[in-house]
Image (spheres, helix red, strand yellow):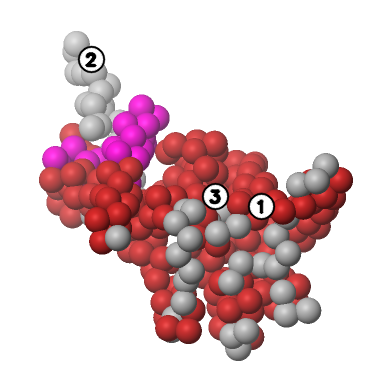
Amino acid sequence: MAADSALRILAALLLGLASALALDRLSAARGLLPPGFRVAWRRGLALVVLGSLLAVGIFAPLVSFGTGAEPDFSQVRTPQLFALHLLMLVTMAVWFLLGFAGAAARTALAGSRTAPEIEVFGEDPAPPAPPQVSLGRQFLAQFGLLAPSVPREIGIGLVLGLAAWIAVLLVLIAIGAVLWAVGGENAVPKQPPALVPFIAGLPIGIRLLISLSAGVFEEGFFRGFLQPRIGIALSTAFFALAHLSYGEPFMLIGITLLSLIYALLTRWRQTIWPAITAHALFDAIQLVVVIPA
């Protein structure tokens, strides 16, 4: 039993590191590698940190799926419900600081700017140096948080988030009806996974905070960080795999549909604020209204 667990941990780590390396290559191909990654140790450390998160948050649920292990939520404390979101935040912060902060990153950035060609007679002065971008604004830009009007994007997210909730619910009902009609009723869950009622039984303030946390940090990681670097298809696949811990394959249909909606919404608006809002709204409706009812 211990050997099986060790093998699953090793498999998750290898998959996580391999995926981080693939992300690094895709980022380089798209010209999205940070300037600080010209320093080998910065790039290597960023790969290790990112690979570790992918191992814990995405591939651990995958390699553990179907093992039959029943989670014991009686031992879960409220802060643990935010642990993965905190790891996402730490990973993005470390990746960003390694890529953009410090003298090494500024030197690499300066070295990447080619000097203009000098006229033979030296008549034309060199153009002024490009303005320096603050570290805070660079952070917002890297993770899709810049927008001409954040309140407008939040409003769009509220409207489209509600529409997405209704649309996905109808699709799941239709798929469930078809499965029942063809004798596949065993594939349709009769009750939500154990984690969902557990969260729905928490105080309403905690449930709302979980919904907001999921919207901000999951969209920040999957849509703000991953999507521009690896594309919609892979970031959506990672999002679905991260939710395998629920233990319900049928739920992955709705999760994948929602992820695609949030991805297209992000591409359309060129910011993650609508996706953050739509995601948080969906989770809040589920945890505050639907499941308790």
Quarter of the picture containing the N terminus is bottom left
Q: Quadrant of residue 284?
A: bottom right
Q: Secondary structure at mark 2?
A: loop
Magenta stretch: residue 17 in it?
A: yes
Within 10 angstroms of label 1, few (less than 14), some, or many (20 or more) residues?
Answer: some
Q: What whole-number distance in Å separates the C-alpha atoms at marks 3 and 1?
A: 11 Å
Residue 159 point in image, percent of width and height? 77, 59
Asked if the residues shown at circle 2 and circle 3 are in contact, with their CB atoms under 8 angstroms apart, the answer is no
Residue 56 point in image, percent of width and height? 35, 58
Residue 200 point in image, percent of width and height? 64, 79
Earlier along the polypeptide chain: callout 3 or callout 1?
A: 3
The amino acid type of the residue labelled 2 equals Glu
Q: Is residue 207 above or below residue 27?
A: below
Residue 234 point in image, percent of width and height? 49, 38
Asked if the residues shown at circle 3 and circle 1 are in contact, with their CB atoms under 8 angstroms apart, the answer is no
- Foreground residue, 160 or 251? 251
Within 10 angstroms of label 2, few (less than 14), some, or many (20 or more) residues?
Answer: few
Q: Mark 1 highlights which residue?
A: 250
The amino acid type of the residue labelled 1 equals Phe
Q: Mark 3 highlights which residue?
A: 240
| Nearer the camera: disc 2 or disc 3 | 3
Asked if the residues shown at circle 1 and circle 2 are in contact, with their CB atoms under 8 angstroms apart, the answer is no
Within 10 angstroms of label 3, few (less than 14), some, or many (20 or more) residues?
Answer: many
Q: Is residue 227 visible?
A: yes
Q: Mark 2 highlights which residue?
A: 119
Left or right side of 44 for 26:
right
Q: Residue at x 72, y 74 (%)?
A: 291
Residues rendered magenta in the picture: 16-40
